[in-house]
Image (cartoon, rainbow, N blue to C red):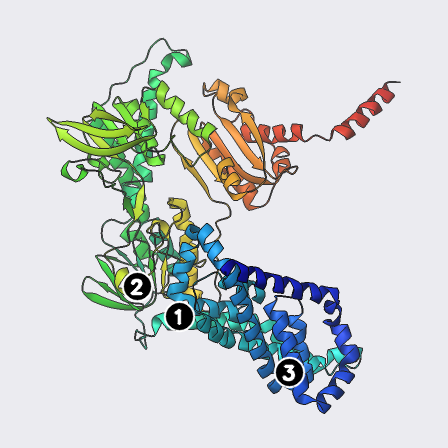
Amino acid sequence: MIRRSKLAVLGLVAILVALFFVFDVPQHLTLDTFKSRQHDIDVFYRANPWLTVCMYFGIYVAVTALSLPGAALMTLAGGAIFGVLTGTVVVSFASTIGATLAFLVSRFLLRDWVQGRFGKNFAAVNEGIDKDGPFYLFTLRLVPIFPFFVINLLMGLTPIRTLVYYLVSQLGMLPATVVYVNAGTQLAKIESVSGILSPGLLASFALLGVFPLVAKKSVDYLRSHKVLRRHQKPRNFDRNLVVIGAGSAGLVSAYIAAAVKARVTLVEKHRMGGDCLHTGCVPSKALIRAAKFVHQVRRARDYGMKRASVDFDFAEVMDRVQRIIRTIEPHDSVERYTQLGVECIRGQARITSPYSVDINGKTLTTRSIIVAAGAQPLIPPIDGLGDIEFWTSDNLWQMRTLPERLLVLGGGPIGCELTQAFARLGSTVTQVEMLPRLLAREDPEISSMVQQRFAEEGVDVHVDTTAGSVRREHGVVHLECEHQGKPVTFEGDELLVALGRRAQVAGYGLEELGVNLTPAGTIEVDHYMRSSVPTIFACGDVAGPYQFTHTAAHQAWYASVNALFGGLKKFKVDYSVVPWATFTDPEVARVGLNEIEAKDKGVAYEVTRYDIKELDRAITDDEAHGLVKVLTVPGKDKILGAAIVGEHAGDLIAEYVAAMRHKLGLNKILGTIHIYPTLAEANKYAAGEWKRTHAPQGVLRWVQRFHRWRLG
């Protein structure tokens, strides 16, 4: 029965749409046609006011309900025929009734099918509509980001109630209706070309242009008011900005605020410099450098040496790591930032309202707050893990005895970097990764190069292997796993858990204020780094989606500027060109799309490869391995992404970062002089490979004939 009803409704809609075009109705819904018949319409309206209103109302409802073109012209015509007051009333009700009918048709014909087939994809949308549907619809109506007919059809697929949809649409479309109807009253007065320059018409069109901006500002105000109305706003503020967390994101945020002479307080409960300085980038790279030196000494014969040896104490290696941290520490110190104009406070911060932060029992009022609390190691729910001592990227730097056998859980960047470093220093390393390959975010050919090098250096790599439980017996760690449905156990003296990091979002008041989180557990922010509470911003690891020091600093600029000046001008964060590197040997660096992402997003691309084993400098350094891989728009030299595997890949990728940022293609790279012999020439040769495959063969054949002719 329902199926027949749907077919009947679908048939009726199809017939009405067909009649609309068969009788060539669109030609009557044009400005020229209206102007040519305006006098006759006005005469008819004066003689038959109610009949005219009813006919206009019915046609408008039909056009809107069937999602046919012409509603905008009819709105203008409504103003021209009926004037502002009557025209607004008629158009407002006709447009809302028509929109609701389109909504109901979409719901009746399509909602069950769409929700059944794409239910998982619509789960987040349904949840959002249930939570904040009326306000979301109101913003769409007030600021027409999408055509109204698209909103009618799409909202019909959601669970929003019909009455709510009608009332919100009636209210949300009213301001735009008034603006368009008013413009229509001015169009009615055009009698000649000079009429186009009439003050009334110019004012109406100026209002049309300004309306979206005014509406957007109104929506921002309403959204902010909705969240902030429960809290008392102070008459005066102690600070312009309070920044929570003194890692990369927090330091940059505070620095920028002080540079523009804002009164800013930076709060850190532990150590200035954050994870990057004390437990992340700096110590890991110091350890990697020491391990690489040991590895190079062991390769003495590759460099023409008969023999060489190295004698080291692991504790002294780790002491060197701490010396390097202490050397860099003054860059991020309280003293330096105090001199820059930042008030630095060591203590526990707790956000008590959108305008106040409690620090060590003292409350500061502030216009804006930036949360830059960073992240901490992700600890998986593995049976027995809580009962044993294990290492993470946070506490690893306290280690002073090199483990003879080390188990590493995790095959991402952190796991891979530390795996290779410990293996080169002499540990027997077993690495366990649940995904089918190491560095799963990279293209398979790239991650396989790293995995092959690990195997050559004696690392026992196990991919597609899931850890189930762990225990320590008689000083030996037993890691019980599953591989392709079969149990397998690995043994080691120590366990390093390196499965990435999770945002620190608990413990400083976000829960009480109802700040929204993403499914990934980070603070949900908009394009301006603003959280669901308009006075609270977030940047760095706590906000995602990237967990790199350089992206934290990048986000911090937007967070601080928008927090301080957002009332005047806001800036959208730009993620268009984000590079990163994994500091294994060979290094892996990337910017933009790789093949996996291009395929997932349906982006057409071409691939150009250059094998670094052909590069002179790589050969002289006995590092002739790796590749440069560039994705470009088919048939063009526009760069979509680049990946480099090899010595100093993290440095070499900078040329592609600059090229993409400033929209330079491979032809520009090819035409740039590169010093010989350097590793940077690899970028030029990759561009040359692209040029060779895209050489204009037809032109070259004519050039060849020209040269033959010149020979006589």
Residue 602 tag number? none
Q: Marks 2 and 3, how far apart in space?
A: 49 Å
Q: Can residue 319 be spotted in the picture?
A: no
Q: Position of residue 81 (x, y in %)?
A: 69, 83
The answer to whether residue 268 is above or below residue 482 is below
Residue at (35% x, 52% y) in the render: 519
Q: Position of residue 659 (x, y in %)?
A: 56, 41
Dot 1 amino acid type: Ser
Q: Which residue is mark 1?
A: 224
Which of discs 1 and 2 lies nearer the camera? The answer is: 2
Q: Which residue is mark 2?
A: 514
Mark 2 or mark 3: whose residue is earlier in sequence? 3
Q: What secondary structure is marked by label 1?
A: helix
Residue situated furthest top in the rendering: 306
Which of discs 2 and 3 lies nearer the camera? The answer is: 3
Dot 3 amino acid type: Cys
Q: What secondary structure is marked by label 3?
A: helix
| Residue toward you, 423 or 497 | 497
Mark 1–mark 3 contact, CB under 8 Å? Answer: no
Category of crowding for the residue at label 3, using alpha-carbon neighbours closer than 10 angstroms: few (below 14), some (14–19), many (at least 20) = few
| Residue toward you, 268 or 692 | 692
| Residue toward you, 687 or 83 | 83
Mark 1–mark 2 contact, CB under 8 Å? Answer: no
In which quadrant will I find the C terminus? top right
- Identify the image quadrant of residue 322: top left
Residue at (32% x, 38% y) in the render: 282
Q: Which residue is mark 3?
A: 54
Q: Position of residue 492 (x, y in %)?
A: 20, 25
Residue situated furthest left in the rendering: 474
